[in-house]
Image (cartoon, rainbow, N blue to C red):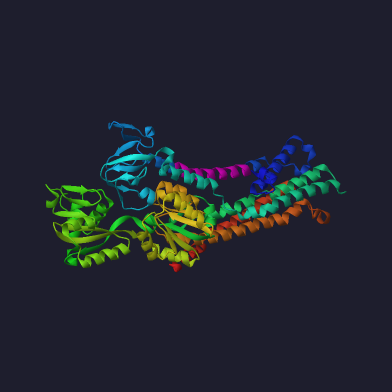
Amino acid sequence: MGIPALLRYAPDMNSLVVLGTTAAFAFSTVVTFVPDWIPDSSRHVYFEASAVIITLVLLGRYLELKARGQAGEAIEKLLGLQPQTVHHIDSDGVERIVPLSDIKPGHVLRVLAGERVPVDAVVASGASHIDESMLTGEPIPVARKEGDAVFAGTLNQNGVLILRATGVGQSTVLAGIVAMVRQAQAVKLPIQQLVDRVTLWFVPAVMVLALSAFVLWLILPAEPTLSKALVTAVTVLIIACPCAMGLATPLSIMVATALLPDKAFGFRRGDALQTLSSTRIVAIDKTGTLTEGRPSVVGIWTLQSEEQADWVLARAAWLEQSSTHPLATALVSAARQKGLVLQSPPNVATIPGKGVQLASEGEANADLRVGAIDWITEFAGSLPQDGQQAVERWEQEACTVVAVAEGSQWLGLIAIADRLRASAPSAVKNWQASGRTVVVITGDRLGTAEAVARTVGADAFHARILPANKAEIVTSLRGKGKVAFVGDGINDAPALAGADVGIAMGSGTDVAVHAAEVVLIGHDLNKISFAFRLSELTLGNIRQNLFWAFGYNVILLPVAAGVLYPFTGLLLSPMLAAGAMAASSVCVVLNALRLSGADTLNGALNTNERKR
């Protein structure tokens, strides 16, 4: 990589490695096989130095490629969400179980309750609720009926669906997510290291200096010998070999990431620690990131008095005990948290898209019902005025409202929503205080996204966004500044991979974690503010390291070329050059270790706490 960069007239760190190691290896070879060419005082070999430098460079490259490849490996596990066999209905109406690979667009399939949808399709008949959270992030299953589209990998909650396949294999939305992550990581450029900017002119300068020293020592009258010229040129190249410069960045990153207080977060890629400090936009997913990612009961309205709220909740939870629907789970969980005693689950009938009721000989004789307001209205009549006001208030807060009735009598309403994380508002405020713009991006509906963005104080929001569109929005935001994207789900993976820095919730999916560079441990979003501050401190330390590394080069390169020889008789040998190179590395190491001081890290943490 270093030689092509030289040929392109764009030398980088690899070019310095090639020059230094090649010079050391070639000089050592001459010392080994033609020692008479070299003065006695300079007969030293540097095979091990060349080998160590190359080994470390290759190791770093291997770890980088391995980290990049893990995202693809993890996200390919998504394809395992598709069933390997499906219920295929042929043209004669005969149903057979066949391999998924046999399915083609236009084939008719049957999907039972509790099964995953095997392909992208359109509902030919039937009705059910589909859990699409893996694609949209919306925690509450959506109703799907004849004519609606469904997607591979999503979960059929209840009811039997007859589907007509529209997309199979690599044509599914699920396969598209895999392709998007691969593409985002393939085209994503590595961070432009500060050292790369300097080496653009430093490498040509070293080459010119080494060649000039070689020529001058050949033509000058003072010992114009080939051996002296060769030793001087090699000394220049060895002393320019980027040991200290190579340590300047990774060492600071290693020290900073190894001493994180309370294991607040982890860095899967060290360059993310540098990039964080220059991010100007924080784009964040809603479900599971700003919110807890699961529906919870947030309010109850009763027809008579507030004292009956627990009784209404208990009646609804008792009826919903046997359901696996997330709304039913929220009702049962809330009842148990309140210590309400639920009797044995009753015999219930599920009305797809409407709700559940006590099973009886006729629908008109069903006593207790829990479900959609419109459905309950068919039996209990219009909702009272104060109930309508409660519904309007809850809908503005992005809640889903469940109605409860017994016979022709309204019992109450229960509001269910995905609660905000306690740290969300303060975290958003901290990010904005540091000069960053906060944008909420979610696959959830418009009303929910608007309510959440308003509550946390975000600068902007985007709703009803599919995974492909999330990545597109992140790309467009990058035109306004570097973007940090925070997410947790499968649907966030393309955006996490496409952002300048992807930050994944540690409790999120493996796919999200492997697509991100930073992993947040726990659920406290305020820790991200500390990550920004630590990034600033680390980048400052890196700049100091580079000063020491290049300062040593600037001072000693002329000495290595022999500029002091006419006045003092001083001329560095390759051995002394290697020692000076080691001394420079020691300075960089000691400076980097300053980051590990308790005062530095505690100061960063306290700064973050004061902002909170």
Nearer to me, 530 or 261: 530
Residue drawn at x 47%, y 46% as measured from the top left = 180
Task: Answer with the quarter of the image where residue 61 lies.
Answer: top right
* Residue drawn at (25%, 67%) of the image: 389
Describe residue 19's horizontal placement relative to residue 320 as left or right: right
The answer to whether residue 57 is magenta is yes
Locate the N terminus by quadrant: top right
Question: Measured from the top left, where is residue 4 in percent x and y?
Answer: 67, 43
Which secondary structure type mostly characterizes the magenta part of the structure?
helix
The quadrant the C terminus occupies is bottom left
Tell me if residue 499 comes above or below residue 88 in the rendering: below
Q: Is residue 444 left or right of residue 301?
A: right
Assess whether residue 167 is covered by the magenta stretch.
no
Query: Residue 307, image x and y in percent?
Result: 17, 66
Residue 503 at x, y = what percent?
A: 46, 54
Viewer-closest of 69 and 447: 447
Can residue 243 be seen from the camera position used here? yes
Q: Position of residue 334 (x, y in %)?
A: 24, 57
Where does the magenta region start and end? 52-73
Residue 254 visible to an observer of this rendering? no
